[in-house]
Image: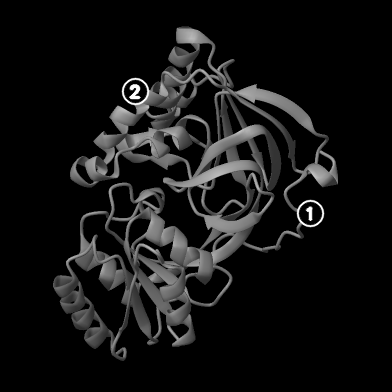
Amino acid sequence: MNPEDTPVTSTDLPQSDQAIRTPETARPGLAAVVYNPIKVDLAALKSAVAAEESAAGWPETLWFETSADDPGQGPARQALEAGASVIIVAGGDGTVRAVAEIVHGTDCSLALLPSGTGNLLARNLKLVLDDPEQSIHAAFTGFDRAIDVAMIEIERGDRTVDRHAYLVMAGLGLDAKMLANTDDALKAKVGWLAYVKALAAVGQDKNDLHFRYSLNKQPTQSMRAHTIMVGNCGSLPAKIVLLPDAAVDDGVFDIVVLKPEGVLGWLQIVSKVIWENGVLARTPLGRKFQTKDVDALNYATGTELILRLHRPEEIELDGDEFGKAVALKTWIDPGSLTVRVPNDAG
């Protein structure tokens, strides 16, 4: 891809000697909670945090509320400026992503209190999703684990470029269009089932993605596909494993490209994602029967991807729609985010 065609110039990627930091028992520090008031029972949360901070001998915890205009970046900056050594994020995937966007690259740890419908990062870290007391206990007593953060610069139709972080996946195509067509009110009532209606509508869309791309600074190639997703993690709700080899701390992102041709192509994708990745991959015997790439679905890995689209397309980050992109550059920032996990975590 010619330099003038790319959304940004080449970025020097940070280097990391190790993906996992040596765990150390948390020392007394200062905790802050960044919370989405719609997602949490604030009175119960404050009571549980007060009990844990007292038991750990920590000072009084700081509290910062998100809003529709600021999903977490502003509160996270305030927490850092106040000297927080660990930020407890009580909210959905969007809140976690927004806070991590500010916290990554600092000495502050991120503790997750799963509070949304997806909880994608928590799922991929194999954290308990329905035990807030355990999650809060881990924030004050757990271990620090370093994970990768994926960065992305999105070029818009007016040639402006905005930069974001994401922790799970970025997507163009089916998933982004589905999110753009999801009824937020219905999602609030029934969670992930709200996507079924959107999926049915998007399934009628026959428009493929046309794009040019350069992976890992290799020569530019052209491709036509239905969907492309770049993942730092591989698991989705309902035990769907979209990227079976993805890991949050391996220093690379994984890419999946969907190129179905008719019903047979979709059957190949369902068989690969649901049956092979979700069932066969769980046992050594089952893995012997797994196939490589199929015509309708291809995998790749990398540390940098530059992509320019034929026309503006919907893009999503960690399950949230991010408008339309005409080009993007995404790269991995290895080991740049410290996550607080329970002492008994693997």
Question: Which quadrant would the N terminus be assigned to in this image?
Answer: top right
Q: Which residue is mark 1?
A: 10
**Disc 1 residue type?**
Ser
As helix, strand or loop, the secondary structure at mark 1 comes to loop
First of labels 2, 1 by sequence position: 1
Type of amino acid under label 2: Ala
Left or right: residue 76 compared with residue 191: right
Residue 245, given in percent of the width and then of the height, sits at 53, 38
Could you tell me residue 184's position as x and y percent? 29, 44
Instruction: Say above or below: 210 vs 247.
Output: above
Secondary element under disc 2, as helix, strand or loop, is helix
| Quadrant showing the C terminus | bottom left
Specify whether 186 is left or right of 119.
left
Q: Position of residue 60 (x, y in %)?
A: 28, 89
Q: Which mark is residue 116?
A: none
The vertical placement of 96 against 189, above or below, is: below
Q: Please say which color scheme the image uses.
A: one colour
Residue lying at the far front of the rendered structure? 158
Which of discs 2 and 1 lies nearer the camera? The answer is 2
Q: Which residue is mark 2?
A: 200
How packed is label 1: few (under 14 Cα within 10 Å), some, or many (20 or more)? few
Which residue is depicted at the point 58% across and 62% down?
Answer: 335
Left or right of 158 on screen, residue 62: left
Residue located 80% across and 34% down the image: 220
Q: Residue 278 or 321: which is nearer the viewer?
A: 321
Say which of 323 and 308 sits in front: 323
> Does residue 85 appear in the picture of this structure?
no
Q: Residue at the spot x=57%, y=17% of the render?
A: 294
Q: Classify mark 2: residues with Cα within 10 Å, few (<14), some (14-19) or many (20+).
A: few
Residue appearing at x 20%, y 77% in the figure: 46
